[in-house]
Amino acid sequence: MSYDQAAISEPLAIGVYAVRQSIPMKGAKVGILGFGPIGMSVLLPALAMGAACYFPIHATLCPKSTLTPALEQVTFIVH
């Protein structure tokens, strides 16, 4: 295993665990609050398990009036 592979394995394991502990992904709309290494690591297994679409949201850049309606449209939220 290379150092690059080793470095990404821990965030990816967290993402896979989060998706497995959540609702069934088939057809789900997934909202990801914070699109850093962990958020991106959630996206891959969610799509692999059948999520229909995703909404990466950087919460610090969105005013609350914009963020609330967006969150009402998703089925599963990761923060």
Image: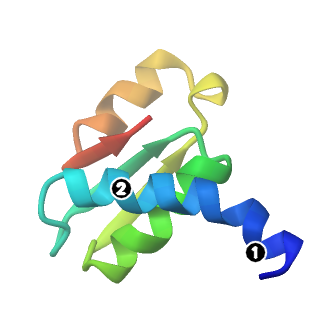
* Scheme of image coloration: rainbow
Quadrant where the C terminus sits is top left
Label number found at residue 70: none
Position of residue 70 measured from the top left corner of the image (x, y, whole percent): 35, 39
Judge whether 56 appears above or below 54 on screen. Answer: above
Label 1: few (<14), some (14–19) or many (≥20) C-alpha neighbours in 10 Å: few
- Identify which amino acid the numbered label 2 is placed on: Tyr
Label 2: few (<14), some (14–19) or many (≥20) C-alpha neighbours in 10 Å: few
Q: Is residue 49 visible in the rendered structure shown here?
A: yes
Judge whether 37 appears above or below 20 on screen. Answer: above
Position of residue 18 measured from the top left corner of the image (x, y, whole percent): 34, 50
The front one of 64 and 78 is 78
The front one of 5 and 32 is 5
Q: Is residue 70 left or right of residue 27?
A: right
Q: Are marks 2 and 1 in contact (CB under 8 Å)?
A: no
Position of residue 39 measured from the top left corner of the image (x, y, whole percent): 55, 50
Q: Quadrant of residue 11?
A: bottom right
Determine the CA span between mark 2 and mark 1.
18 Å
Residue that carries the numbered disc 2 in the rendered image: 17
Q: Residue sitting at 58 percent across and 38 percent down?
A: 34
- Identify which amino acid the numbered label 1 is placed on: Gln
Label number found at residue 5: 1
Q: Secondary structure at mark 2?
A: helix
Q: Quadrant of residue 28?
A: bottom left
Quadrant where the N terminus sits is bottom right
